[in-house]
Image (cartoon, rainbow, N blue to C red):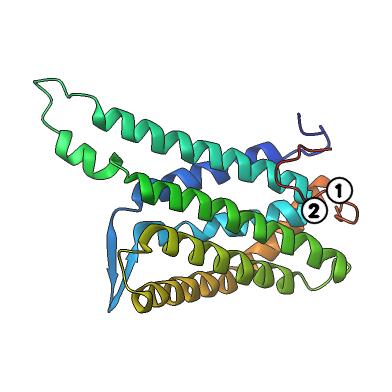
Amino acid sequence: MPQPARFRYLDHLINVFVVVLIVSNLVAPKIVAIGDFRLSGAQLLFPVTYIFGDIFTEVYGYSASRRAIWTGFLASALLSVMGLIVVALPPAPDWHDQEAFAKVFDFVPRLVAASLIAYWCGEFSNAFVMARMKVLTKGKMLWTRTIGSTVVGQLVDSIVVMFLAFGGTLGLKTILTLIVSGYLGKVIYEVAATPLTYAVVNALKRAEGMEVFDTSTDFNPFHGQK
C-alpha cells in the first residue's frame, strides 16, 4: 500500500536503510582486527540498521517500520539468491576472477538462512518494543526506548543467528561467547549513537509536523499497513 503523502521523507529513509543493509552484507566476509578484537566487516555497519529501525518506529510508527523491515528482508534475500546463482554459473574462459568473486558472493546457504531469519526476528522485536515503550512513556525519555528496544532486538538477533548458523558445529560455550561478545558490542554502539538518534528524530518530527503513537496498532508482522 502506498505511504500517505504526508510522510515527506520516509521513502528516502527506507532507500538509505536498504543500502546500508546490503552494504553490510557485502562487507561481512572480511574480519577486521582492532587491537585484540576481531570483528566482521558487517558489525561495523549493521548496527546502524537498528538505529534506522528506532527512527522509523519513533517518527512514523510501527506500520512504517514493518514496511522498511520487509523491504530490507526481500532485498537481502534477492542479493543472497543472486549471489548463489551467479557464482554457480560457469565463468567465461577469458575471465579469471571467479575465485575472488566467489569469495565475496558464494554465500553459504545455512548462513544466509540464519542471517535472514535473525534479521527478521531482531528487527521486528526492536520495532515492537520501541512502539510499546513509546505509548507507556507517553512519548517521553526517548533514550529509554532506543536503548531498551536495542537490548531486546539485538539479543534476539544474536541468539538466533549464532544458534542457527553454528549449532551442531561449534560447542555451546563457543556459541555463547560469540553471542555475548557480539551482543555487547552492538548495544554499546547503540548507546554511543543515542545523541545522533535524538538529533535525527527531533529534526524529522519537526519536518513532518506530526507525532505517531501506536495505541491501537496491529503488530502482526504479516499484516499490511492500514
Query: What amino acid type should be assigned to the residue bearing mark 1?
Result: Gly
Estimate the x, y position of residue 42 in percent, counting from the top left. Answer: 40, 56
Q: Which mark is residue 209?
A: 1
Q: Is 149 left or right of 218, judged from the image as shown?
A: left
Nearer-the-camera pick, 188 or 217: 217
Q: Residue at x 76, y 69 (%)?
A: 142
Judging by the rendered image, the residue that carries numbered circle 2 is: 205
Neighbours of disc 2 within 10 Å: few (<14), some (14-19), many (20+): some
Q: CA distance from mark 2 to mark 1?
A: 6 Å
Q: Which mark is residue 21?
A: none
- Which of the 4 image quadrants contains residue 86? top left
Q: Is 166 left or right of 126, judged from the image as shown?
A: left
Nearer-the-camera pick, 200 or 30: 30
Q: Residue at x 67, y 67 (%)?
A: 149
Quarter containing the C terminus: top right
Farthest residue in the front direction? 168
Query: What amino acid type should be assigned to the residue bearing mark 2?
Result: Lys
Q: Residue at x 67, y 37 (%)?
A: 11
Neighbours of disc 1 within 10 Å: few (<14), some (14-19), many (20+): few
Q: Is 20 left or right of 52, judged from the image as shown?
A: left
Q: Is 110 left or right of 65, judged from the image as shown?
A: left
Estimate the x, y position of residue 97 in percent, counting from the top left. Answer: 15, 33
Is 124 situated above or below 18? below
Q: Residue at x 30, y 53 (%)?
A: 29
Residue 15 in sight: no
- Which of the 4 image quadrants contains residue 41? bottom left
- Secondary element type, mark 2: helix
- Which of the 4 image quadrants contains residue 141? bottom right
Estimate the x, y position of residue 53 in percent, counting from the top left. Answer: 64, 54
Dots 2, 1 in contact, CB < 8 A: yes
